[in-house]
């Protein structure tokens, strides 16, 4: 059985307002609802787990009633870190469950159906998969002394979500204690010595974190 854990623990500080960014509206609908709808469109059988800070859960339920949002989902408590939030969402999946679990940013409402499908199917074969994009800007490395040099952008990729994993592999990975090097879910799995396959992402799959991102999202939405 397959799952998606949608992590939405942001406070919206970079957005400059009091409303957490996942609850802001694009085209008359909260971003988080749009994100959940993308995964329900991928599969009616996908189990959806939403990770929210306890302080935001009542507000979310009110929004669901206000907008008539009826897509079934479980809710897990958000943690102080992304690692803890993902782990809390993962705890709602039975320990003996077989299948693929994806972890997705709640503020990425424009992930394409083809990317979702490719991530899940690749993880089914390769145990772990992430969507990536080529780097188009020039990259510069900055050293500890303030100096720097340009680096080859062909050696790097931009990483998106959903990041998808064999459920048993992901559960083993999250038994590890937290490390500063755990910058995303793939890095947690890689710490076990596992390879993570890459699939092509979609350019529209932006993470909405700033007012400028909202302008782009409103244009796309």
Image (cartoon, rainbow, N blue to C red):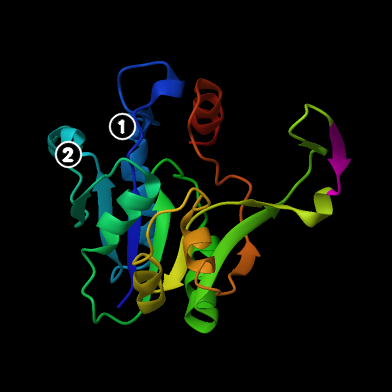
> Dot 1 lies on which element?
helix
Figure quadrant of residue 74? bottom left
Residue 198 appears in view: yes
Instruction: Quote the CA–CA distance across marks 2 and 1.
Output: 15 Å
Q: Residue under circle 1? A: 23
Q: Identify the residue at image location x=34%, y=71%.
A: 171
In x, y percent, where is residue 33?
31, 43
In x, y percent, where is residue 11?
34, 28
Residues in magenta, as a range: 148-152
Q: Identify the residue at image location x=20%, y=34%.
A: 56
Answer few, some or many: residues within 10 Å of disc 1's Cα (few below 14, many 20 plus, some between 14 and 19): many
Q: Nearer the viewer, residue 24 or 175?
A: 175
The answer to whether residue 41 is magenta is no
Residue 63 appears in view: no
> On the rendered structure, is 107 left or right of 87?
right
Q: Residue under circle 2? A: 54
Q: Nearer the viewer, residue 114 or 7?
A: 7
| Mark closer to the chain start, 2 or 1 | 1
């Amino acid at each position: 059985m397959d799952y998606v854990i949608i992590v939405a623990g942001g406070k919206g500080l970079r957005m400059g307002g009091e409303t957490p960014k996942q609850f802001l509206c694009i085209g008359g609908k909260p971003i988080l609802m749009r994100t959940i709808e993308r995964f329900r469109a991928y599969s009616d059988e996908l189990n959806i787990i939403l990770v929210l800070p306890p302080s935001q859960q009542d507000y979310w339920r009110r929004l669901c009633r206000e907008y008539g949002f009826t897509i079934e989902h479980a809710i897990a408590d958000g943690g102080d870190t992304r690692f803890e939030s993902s782990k809390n969402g993962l705890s709602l999946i039975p320990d003996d469950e077989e299948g693929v679990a994806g972890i997705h940013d709640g503020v990425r409402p424009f992930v394409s159906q083809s990317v979702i499908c490719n991530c899940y199917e690749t993880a089914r074969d390769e145990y772990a998969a992430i969507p990536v994009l080529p780097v188009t800007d020039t990259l510069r490395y900055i050293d500890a002394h303030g100096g720097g040099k340009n680096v080859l952008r062909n050696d790097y990729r931009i990483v998106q979500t959903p990041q998808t994993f064999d459920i048993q592999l992901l559960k083993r990975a999250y038994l590890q204690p937290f490390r500063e090097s755990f910058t995303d879910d793939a890095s947690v799995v890689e710490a076990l010595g596992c390879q993570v396959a890459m699939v092509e992402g979609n350019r529209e799959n932006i993470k909405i974190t700033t007012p400028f991102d909202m302008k782009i999202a409103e244009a796309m939405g």
